[in-house]
Image (tube, rainbow, N blue to C red):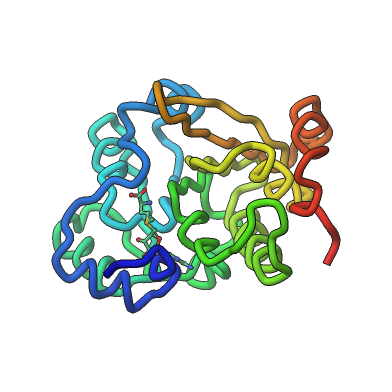
Amino acid sequence: MESNSQYCRMDYWDERFKTEQKFEWLSGLDAFQHIVTPLVDQESRIAHIGCGSSHVYMQLYNLGYENITNIDYSQVLIENGRRLHPYMTWIADDITTLANCESASFDVVFEKATIEAVLVTEKSAWEPSDEALRTLESIFSSISRVLKPNGMFISVSFTQPHFRIPALLRQKNWSVEMFEFGENFHYYVYVCRKGTDADNELARRYTSIAKSWLRPL
Ligand SMILES: C[S@@+](CC[C@H](N)C(=O)[O-])C[C@H]1O[C@@H](n2cnc3c(N)ncnc32)[C@H](O)[C@@H]1O
């Protein structure tokens, strides 16, 4: 039987992408387009990290965003993408390093449900392990490195702000904003702006309950 713990294993994703052409985690762009597209210029260079077989990149492309780089650590997925959509850039890379991406090269880094996949074996939302915090620091510092000086990280997630906002604030050189969408189950769009003061009302409101996400290592 399939278990969620597989979502943090590359061999699981490689096997899955041998046959999977399209699967949309959480939601397609339609449900959050009204939040994201007003924030992003059409000329932006966009990195879609942990892209999987989501078609958000196609939806963005059809809206006029033509400068999209799809990034995933599954070589199988990246080879399929290159073959089927050669007019986009495809890079096999791990989001904990983004070692194959140049520094200061993207206006926007976008992710959806990939941070959840990376943290899937965590036992408690209240007490993250040291390993989880180290992994998040690596992910966020890699994203910040590949963003241009005023670049933006957009993360679409089901993780409650009391847990995700303090985690995002481990990265010191960006601010965090939050939007919500969804009718029954609610999802969140977290927007981190590089080079902007992180000390704001939202940060104060959401860092007092689950403090462990901000604890020093
Ligand atoms: C839950 S799926 C989300 C896919 C897509 N973003 C969506 O919303 O439909 C997680 C994706 O992240 C990729 N992934 C997981 N860990 C990764 C890592 N450390 N580096 C790069 N990609 C990773 C997997 O291969 C998979 O495509």
Q: Relative to 75, does residue 63 appear above or below in the rendering?
A: above
User: Relative to 198, is 74 on the left or the right?
Assistant: left
User: Relative to 217, is 66 on the left or the right?
Assistant: left
Q: Position of residue 163 (x, y in %)?
A: 67, 45
Q: Position of residue 121 (x, y in %)?
A: 53, 66
- Residue at screen point 57% across, 44% down: 153
Q: How many marks?
A: 0
Point out the image quarter for the N terminus: bottom left
Q: Relative to 190, does residue 143 appear above or below in the rendering?
A: below
Quarter of the displayed picture in which ligand 1 can be seen: bottom left
- Name the image quarter holding residue 133: bottom right
Q: Which one is in front, 1 or 192?
A: 1
Q: Relative to 49, does residue 187 appear above or below in the rendering?
A: above
- Residue at screen point 69% across, 39% down: 162
- Residue at screen point 31% across, 69% down: 13
Q: Which one is in front, 90 or 198?
A: 198
Q: Which one is in front, 171 or 31?
A: 31
- Residue at screen point 80% across, 25% down: 201
Point out the image quarter for the C terminus: bottom right
User: Relative to 204, is 126 on the left or the right?
Assistant: left
- Name the image quarter holding residue 57: top left
Q: Position of residue 44 (x, y in %)?
A: 45, 39
Q: Position of residue 62 (x, y in %)?
A: 23, 34
